Amino acid sequence: MDKNIVIEKEKREAPQSRIVNPEPNDIRIKKCRYFNNYQTCATLMLDDLSLTALDDDGSIKPWSDWGFRLNSEGSMFRYLEDNLLKKYPEVKGTFFFPIGKHAAMHHNAGYRLHFNEMNESFKCFANEMSNRFEIAFHGTNHGRYKDNNNPSMSNWDQEFEYLTLDNIPALAREIERVEDFLGIKMHGGKYPGYRMNGDSKKIVESLGFKWWCSHDSMINRKHNDNRHYYFGEENRVLGFPTNLSGCVFNHHLKSGFAPGSFTQRLRREFRMIRFENYIRYLYKKGLIISIQEHHFCLRTDGKRQTPNAFDDINSLDMIFGFLRGADIWYATCSEIAHYLESYDHTDVEKQSNGNVILKYNGRWDEPLITLKSNCRQLQNVSTGEILPGVYRQGEWLYNGIKEGEYKTI
C-alpha cells in the first residue's frame, strides 16, 4: 500500500477567535448523523468466540484456539491483543458467541478436542474486555452435522436453517441464563454462516433483539445494504451491514503464477487500489466500516476458516493503519445500532418561543444522540440543568442528550 495515500477529509472552517451566541432567530439545533458528529463509524466483528480448542501435535496454539484459553499466554485473544489491539487502542468491536457447545468440533476427525463450560474465568474475561468488546448472540451450538461420521463441512447445517418458531421458548431461556450469569445484555446477533429459513426473522424479532446481521451480500462491494435498514413485522429490528472482510489486503502464496511475475504484481496492485477506494467510498458516504473476521483459524476438517484474525493480522494492521487519523467513531455493534436507531426515531421540534423539544419513539430505554448547534449552551427547561456544548468542526456539540424541552442561553 502506498503509505502516502490518506483518506480524504472534509475541509473544516477554522474556529473564530471570538465565539458569541447568535441572535434567537438565527439559532440552529440539528441531529448529528453519528455520535460526536463523526464522519462515520468502524467496528471489528469477530465470529465464533467459543470455549473450545483443538490440537494435532499435543498443544494448543493461537491458530487452533477458539476461545478455550481466553486471554492467557498462547491464546488467540492474546495474539490479537499483542499484534493489533495494543497498536490500535481505538479499535472496538463485537464477539459473536455461540452460547452452547460449538457443534462444529467433530469428534471423529482425529484431533484432540478441548471444551470448557461457561464459568467464572469466562465471566472475568468478558468483564475485562467489556471496555472494548461486547458479546452478541450467534446461536446456541452454531449448527449440526447431518451424518455424525462425516467431518466435512459440506455435511453441515447452520443452526437457523432448521430452527422453527417452536424453538423460541427454549432459546429465550438459554439467552436469559447466559445474560444473568455474565451480567450482560445481548442486544443483537448474527445468523451462523449467514444462513436462515422462513421462520428466522420472526424468531429474531420474537426474542427481542434490537439489531441483527442477516446476510453478507454487501461485503466488499457497493450495495444498497451497505447502509443499515429495518426488518420484521413491525419493521423495528435494525439490519446491521457487514461491509468489509478483514482479509482484503492479504498477500499470500498462491499457485497459478510464477513468483514475482508481472501478472502477479499487477493483480496485487489492482486489489490494493480496489479496496482502498472501497474503504474511501464507505468513509465519504458515511457508511459503517464493519470489518468481518473469525476468532479462530483451524477447523476439524483440516481447513483454515476464512476470513480469520490469525491469518489476516497483517491485513487488519493495514486496514486500521489506513483509517488512522480519519474522523471515525470506533464502537461496538450495539453502540452503533443504538445511535442509528435513535437518529432515525428522534425528532427535534422547534417551538414558537425558540425552544426545542427532543422526542424519542424507539426501542431502547433512552436515546443515544448528539445534537449540533451554533449556540454554546442549552438549558433543560424542566430541570434547569445547563448543558455546555463542546466546540468541534465549527459547531457546538451536545452528546448523549436526553428527551425533553431545551432553551438556548
Image (spheres, rainbow, N blue to C red):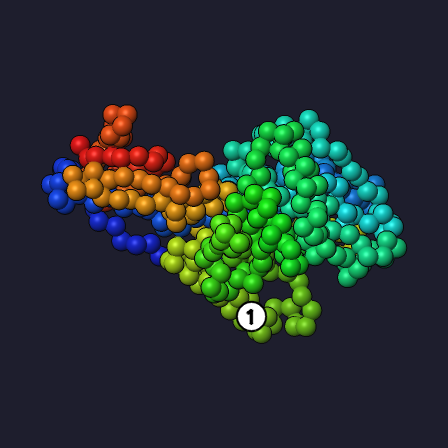
Q: Which residue sits at x=43%, y=43%?
A: 362
Secondary element at image label 1: helix
Q: Amino acid at mark 1?
A: Arg
Q: Nearer the viewer, residue 43 or 202?
A: 202
Viewer can see residue 329: no
Q: Which residue sits at x=27%, y=28%?
A: 382
- Position above or below: 218 against 132: below
The percent position of residue 41, horizontal first and vertical second, equals 43, 48
Q: Quadrant of residue 304?
A: bottom right
Number of numbered discs on residues: 1
Q: Which residue sits at x=32%, y=45%?
A: 347
Query: In the picture provided, is 358 more to the left or to the right than 301?
Result: left
Q: Quadrant of residue 7?
A: bottom left
The percent position of residue 285, horizontal first and vertical second, equals 38, 58
The percent position of residue 280, horizontal first and vertical second, equals 42, 59
- Position above or below: 221 against 69: below
The percent position of residue 157, horizontal first and vertical second, equals 75, 57
Residue under pointer 1: 267
Quadrant of the drawing holding the C terminus: top left
